[in-house]
Image (cartoon, helix red, strand yellow):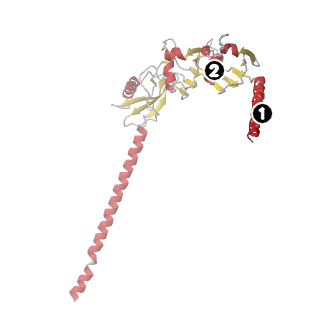
Amino acid sequence: MVQAVNSRKTNPEPQVNTDKHRSKRIRIIRVHLCSSLAILLLSASSLAQVQPVTTQNLPAQEIHPNDLVGVSVYGEPELTRTVRVGADGTIRLPMLKEKIKADGLMPEELEQAIVRALKTQEILTHPFVTVTVAEYHSLPPISVAGAVRIPITFQPVEKKITLLEAITRAGGLSPEAGSEILVTSPLSPAGAGTQATNAVSLVRRVQVKSLIDAADPDSNILLEGGEEIRVPELGKVYVVGNVKNPGAFPVQDTSGTSILKVLALTQGLTPYATHEAFIYRREAGAASKNEIPVDLKKIMDRKSPDVPLMANDVLYIPDAHKRRATTSALEKAFLFGGIAVSALIYAMVR
């Protein structure tokens, strides 16, 4: 009995030792976890510093003043950054005593120049440098507006792009596009001391047919930056009055739009249209529209030439009131006569 009691008293001692070992292992695991987490955070911050803040990597071309370049030095976050080329064509990096010339260099050439500077000034022995271009500001932006699918303002990456390429970037012409494209190009000021507000511009008109249909190379002009491309919408001819389908109709070609063609679009005249029509046209610089009478019957009978219409013309075909009144009187007479005959026949049948 005494031995059994003693054995019960000595059993808890191994349990106490096990708890001590378990708590010790937990502390060790916690220390390892904290160390691992600290290493991960330091690595993430180092990687974040190594990567330059660049929005995009544009195609490589010569670097010029005001361009934005991203410089990445592997393993050196304090040297990795995004810098803008100064007006003098140079960039400055930390720890470098002198500026580095970037104007006129390709990104690969600028990488070599930075490597040489780091070695010459004994900052790094074997630097690994990468240069990317985030923004090109050497060429002024080009804007495309008007009757295009996606109006856009973009900065040309290439030195020169064509008019057709600029319109393609805007998604192409919309169905409402007119027959010509207006290209406004900025010109240099008259004198060296002339302000930019006094600079003149050149407006060129390009026919859509010659640019797209005929593929005329002279119409596909080169753009050098700063141009404004405007595509006016189609002009319209408005037809009102005694036609079957009045409305506004687009004018694809001003030289080929006439009264007969527009009447065909309206599905023809109504029975009570007059023999005379009127064109209301606003001349350039005029405050009001002019009224131009047209002998519609002679045109329809091919006794008079067709009359051309211009964009924004209003073609009005009046109502023949006398003919309508006469027809109405005849209809009433026929109706009254029909009723009288019907009554007479009914009386005879009875």
The amino acid pointed to by label 2 is Val
x 32%, y 64%: residue: 24
Count of labels shown?
Answer: 2
Q: Quadrant of residue 32?
A: bottom left
> Which image quarter: residue 326?
top right
* Front position in the image: 150 or 92: 150
User: Which residue shows up at 70% across the image and 21% down it?
Assistant: 314
Contact between labelled residues 2 and 1, with CB atoms less than 8 Å apart: no
The dot on residue 22 is: none
Residue named by callout 2 = 262
Mark 1 or mark 2, earlier in chain: 2
Q: Which residue is mark 1?
A: 336
Report, in whole angstroms, how far the alpha carbon at label 1 lies from the one at label 2: 41 Å
Q: Nearer the viewer, residue 125 or 187?
A: 187
Q: Single out the residue that lies furthest toward the bottom.
A: 1
- Percent coordinates x, y for residue 59 in the rendering: 42, 26
Q: Residues within 10 Å of mark 1 (few under 14, many from 20)?
A: few
Q: Residues within 10 Å of mark 2 (few under 14, many from 20)?
A: many
In this picture, residue 21 sits left or right of residue 168: left
Whether residue 347 sits left or right of residue 69 in the image: it is right
Secondary element under disc 1, as helix, strand or loop, is helix
Question: Is residue 281 among the parts visible in the rendering?
Answer: no
Q: Position of residue 107 (x, y in %)?
A: 41, 25
Depth-wise, is mark 1 or mark 2 nearer the camera? 1
